[in-house]
Amino acid sequence: QVQLVESGGGLVQVGGSLRLSCAASGRTFSNYAMGWFRQAPGKEREFVEGISWTGGRTSYADSVKGRFTISRDNAKNTVYLQINSLRPDDTAVYYCAAVEYGSSRLENRSRYEYWGQGTQVTVAS
């Protein structure tokens, strides 16, 4: 089992920034590809960004291109999502997820084996 705990969400003004963190425990973190997803009220959970288990490949949704950046620190068993230039439509619960030895199709929600409980991001206009 892998336990994932997100943190770093909050209320921020339009144009502001946040850094979300997802701390993992339970298995060898460096063996897992990590993804960030988000779910706004009344909408389906959607892919935001992913990073392969080696860290050598990342993928992102077009809606966040140039504004969001995923990174990982295997020494800290943590994956991050740096969010800049926040917009009201970024308001959602943000979830991290993990899949062992994932390197492709990181945008595919069904691939992921473990999920965190989410952290709320609210962008005020």
Image (cartoon, rainbow, N blue to C red):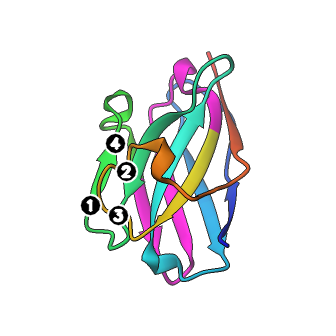
Q: Secondary structure at mark 3?
A: loop
- What is the CA distance from the residue labelled 4 to the residue labelled 2? 9 Å
| Amino acid type at mark 4 | Tyr
Q: Nearer the viewer, mark 4 or mark 2?
A: 2
Label number found at residue 106 = 2
Residue at the spot x=56%, y=51% of the render?
Answer: 19
Q: Position of residue 30 (x, y in %)?
A: 45, 79
* Residue 51: quarter of image: bottom left
> Which corner quadrant holds the N terminus?
bottom right
Q: Are marks 4 and 3 in contact (CB under 8 Å)?
A: no
- What is the CA distance from the residue labelled 2 to the residue labelled 3? 8 Å
- Specify whether 89 is left or right of 52: right
Packing grade of label 4 (10 A; few <14, some 14-19, many >=20) is: many
| Amino acid type at mark 1 | Arg
Q: Which residue is mark 3?
A: 52
Q: Are marks 1 and 2 in contact (CB under 8 Å)?
A: yes
Q: Which residue is mark 1?
A: 57
- What is the CA distance from the residue labelled 1 to the residue labelled 2? 10 Å
Q: How many marks?
A: 4
Q: Are marks 3 and 1 in contact (CB under 8 Å)?
A: yes
Q: Which residue is mark 4?
A: 60
**Is residue 84 one of those drawn in magenta?**
yes
- What is the CA distance from the residue labelled 3 to the residue labelled 1? 5 Å
- Specify whether 68 is left or right of 103: right
Q: Earlier in the sequence, mark 4 or mark 2?
A: 4
Q: Are marks 2 and 3 in contact (CB under 8 Å)?
A: yes
Q: Earlier in the sequence, mark 3 or mark 1?
A: 3
> Which corner quadrant holds the C terminus?
top right
